[in-house]
Every structure is written in structure tokens, then in C-alpha cells.
Image: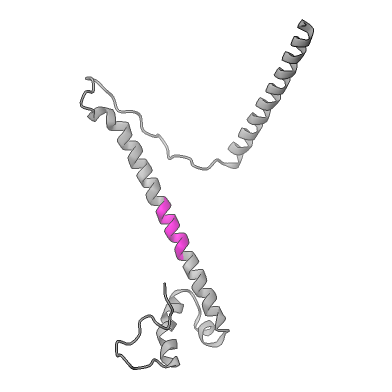
């Protein structure tokens, strides 16, 4: 979508100026593809076209980010699978060498709300325990002196 719309897909004939009507006819299908309605293109505020184009570019960027993440995740799984079988293909591997176990379920990259809450509770318990342990040690040192 880079570049100015008035410069894209111009007629190959040099020297022939494109009329405004020809420009609108040329870009109309592109805006329909972006999700703009016919009424919106022909009858609404022209700045709406700019908003649709911006939204379309943002959507495409999000799609590319999602595809990039999925490709990275696939590479991660392939890497882990290769690491699991690596000992089998090692030149000096001992007889009976086994492959490392592979995942039984997909990797969880995000914790659920319940898991987050449990982690916070466990951290709070540990802090409380450490606090009271430090208090006890302090009292023992004072009583021991």
C-alpha cells in the first residue's frame, strides 16, 4: 500500500493526464476491498477514505505480526524437537542412548487468571514467611547476646 494513490497504477501512456473521474474509478475497487461501502466512497466525507486506508494498513500490520509470531512458534517447536533427538545422532553416543522426551501438550506462554492469582498468593506467602523468619532470627540474636 506504499506510495501515493494518485501515482499507483497510472496509465502507461506518457503525457496523458488522468482525470479526477478516472482516478476515482481506478481507486474505487481498492476501497471496496478495504471494506468501505459504495455509499461511503461516493457520498460521504472524503476523509473517510483516509481512515479506511489507515485501518486497512493497521489490519495488515497486525496480520503480519501474527504470521511472524506463528512462524517463530513453529521454529521453536522444530528447534525443541531437534534438540530432543540430538543425542541419537551424536557421533560418540553410547549404545542405548534415548531421545529426550518431547512435550505432551502445547507450550503455555500465557498464564490463566487462576494461575496468575495462585502465583501471587504463593509469592505473598513466601514474603510473609521470610519476614517472620527474619523477625525470629532477630529476636534469637537479641536474646542470645
Q: Quadrant of the C terminus?
A: top right
Q: Position of residue 134 (x, y in %)?
A: 71, 19
Residue 98 figure quarter: top left
Locate residue 125 relative to residue 60 in the image: left or right: right
**How many numbered markers are drawn?**
0
Locate residue 133 relative to residue 72 in the image: left or right: right
Magenta stretch, main secondary structure, is helix
Taking the spot 55% from the left edge, 79% from the top edge, the residue there is 48
In the rendered image, is residue 11 in sight?
yes
Does 54 appear above or below 41? Answer: above
Outermost residue, front side: 145
Q: Position of residue 117 (x, y in %)?
A: 63, 37
Taking the spot 42% from the left edge, 83% from the top edge, the residue there is 6
Residue 89 figure quarter: top left
Residue situated in front as seen by the camera: 18 or 34: 18
In the rendered image, is residue 1 in sight?
no
Outermost residue, top side: 144
Residue 141 figure quarter: top right
Taking the spot 20% from the left edge, 26% from the top edge, the residue there is 91
Q: Quadrant of the N terminus?
A: bottom left
Q: Is residue 53 magenta?
A: no
Does 103 appear above or below 40? Answer: above
Boundaries of the magenta span: 60-69
Residue situated in front as seen by the camera: 144 or 23: 144
Q: Position of residue 85 (x, y in %)?
A: 28, 32
Amino acid at each position: 500500500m506504499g506510495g501515493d494513490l494518485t501515482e499507483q497504477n497510472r496509465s502507461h501512456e506518457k503525457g496523458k493526464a488522468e482525470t479526477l473521474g478516472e482516478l476515482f474509478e481506478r481507486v474505487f475497487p481498492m476501497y471496496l476491498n478495504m471494506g468501505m461501502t459504495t455509499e461511503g466512497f461516493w457520498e460521504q466525507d472524503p476523509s473517510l477514505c483516509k481512515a479506511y486506508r489507515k485501518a486497512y494498513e493497521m489490519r495488515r500490520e497486525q496480520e503480519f505480526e501474527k504470521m511472524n509470531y506463528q512462524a517463530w512458534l513453529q521454529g521453536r517447536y522444530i528447534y525443541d524437537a531437534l534438540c530432543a533427538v540430538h543425542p541419537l545422532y551424536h557421533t560418540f553416543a553410547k549404545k542405548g542412548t534415548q531421545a529426550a522426551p518431547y512435550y505432551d501438550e502445547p507450550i503455555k506462554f500465557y498464564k490463566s487468571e487462576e494461575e496468575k492469582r495462585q502465583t501471587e498468593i504463593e509469592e505473598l506467602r513466601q514474603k510473609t514467611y521470610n519476614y517472620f523468619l527474619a523477625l525470629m532470627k532477630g529476636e534469637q540474636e537479641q536474646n542470645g547476646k
